[in-house]
Image (tube, grey):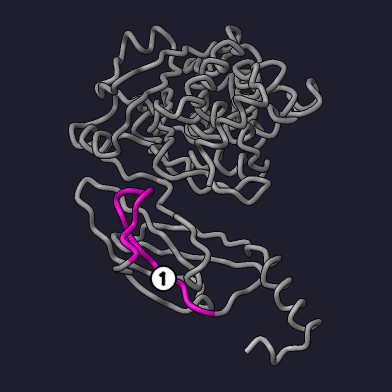
Amino acid sequence: MLKKFPLPVLTFLLLSYCTEEKPDIHVVCENLEGNYHIKWETFPPMKGTVSIYESINPDSFDIQAPLAIVNISDGFKNVFAIRNLRRSYFKLVFNRKYSVITAERAVPMQQLTNFRDFGGYYNENNLQTQWGKLYRSSSLNYATTIDMKFLSALKIKTVIDFRSDDEKFKDPYRYNASQTFNLPLRENPHSTFFFYDKILSKRMRKNDVIIAQQDNLAFVMEHNADYFEQMFDILADKTNYPIVFSCALGKDKTGVAAALILSALSVDREQIISDFLLSNRLTDYDFFLPNLEVYYSDVDVQETMTAMLSSHQEVITYILDRVTKQCGSMDKFLENELKLSPQKRAKLKEIMLY
């Protein structure tokens, strides 16, 4: 067969085959009342088929039994998969050649709000953060018996608790992981962030809350180098996984830590901001609101209190811009202030990316 091709043509075909680059493939998974809605995009557009497999282990799939085989051009597929107290992961194989793993980012819990998987973010080299290794959450003291069974099913080995010593003493975690690291991130002592009396008396309004959040979270990022250095030491040890890191609502201290971790993995700013703002969709704010009649009866108080419990784009962009301006870049901040050496960062990427 090869003799039918002139040498120049054969050389061109071989070189084209050998230098073929993997297409950019991005996949998103959403749970819609028991049905998983899986969407994908490829660049450049691909023809052919995609095979979809399911597993409770993101590192092992039975490729002999696909849930479905559909045309790539369809762009989506709804699949039905029920796992009692188990999490479903999906592997998509495009034209039997390129594979991508996905899952629902928000992990459904009974009362543990804002619990989510850190997998599925893409970095500058188009590598994906691994699923089923790293989670972020609100305080684990809210976990019900069913929630704790789900945490055990996820095989959470390590907990990183960013709450203050007072918070931990008042509300100890109910879930006992193999190891728990207490890293009580310092907050701005002059912050008026949680002064309910100022909100109730209307001396603090929505814009005041945003400014208070900016000041407080900038302080958290800039005055906890020792704790963040310990955090990266924990993350750079593959024997510690799976890991969950958390604070009271899972949005502020946890949000700052998440931004630092994603930056260390070379994930772009847009995804870092999206991750920060996702708390607004995954947090049940009514669960955290004080049982005060004035909150429910006064529109202005309600707006300010809701702003206090929300995550704001003005806050995350402010602290990212501030660090970049002060240090020259986030990379310099990570290396010079948080002692994240190139070697440790490479180790983290080896563990967390595929």
Residue appearing at x 60%, y 25% in the figure: 344
Q: Secondary structure at mark 1?
A: strand
Q: Residues within 10 Å of mark 1 (few under 14, many from 20)?
A: many
Q: Residue 147: x and y, percent?
A: 24, 35
Q: Is residue 328 above or below residue 150?
A: above
Q: Is residue 11 above or below residue 83?
A: below
Judged left or right of residue 86, residue 341 is right
Judged left or right of residue 105, residue 342 is right
Q: Verify whether residue 148 appears in magenta.
A: no
Q: Is residue 91 above or below residue 107?
A: below
Outermost residue toward the bottom in this view: 4
Residue appearing at x 40%, y 27% in the figure: 239
Residue appearing at x 31%, y 68% in the figure: 64
Q: Is residue 102 above or below residue 186?
A: below
Q: Residue 70: x and y, percent?
A: 42, 77
Residue appearing at x 38%, y 48% in the figure: 59
Q: Residue 354: x and y, percent?
A: 53, 47
In which quarter of the view is residue 225 placed?
top right
The mark total stands at: 1
Residue 61 versus residue 335: which sits nearer the camera?
Answer: 61
Judged left or right of residue 208, residue 63 is left
Q: Verify whether residue 61 appears in magenta.
A: yes
Outermost residue toward the front in this view: 3
Q: Residue 232: x and y, percent?
A: 54, 22
Amino acid identity at mark 1? Ser
In which quarter of the view is residue 37 placed?
bottom left
Judged left or right of residue 335, residue 251 is left
Residue 13 versus residue 315: which sits nearer the camera?
Answer: 13
In which quadrant will I find the N terminus?
bottom right
Q: Circle 1 is placed at which residue position?
A: 51
Q: Which residues are magenta?
A: 48-63
Residue 1 versus residue 9: which sits nearer the camera?
Answer: 1
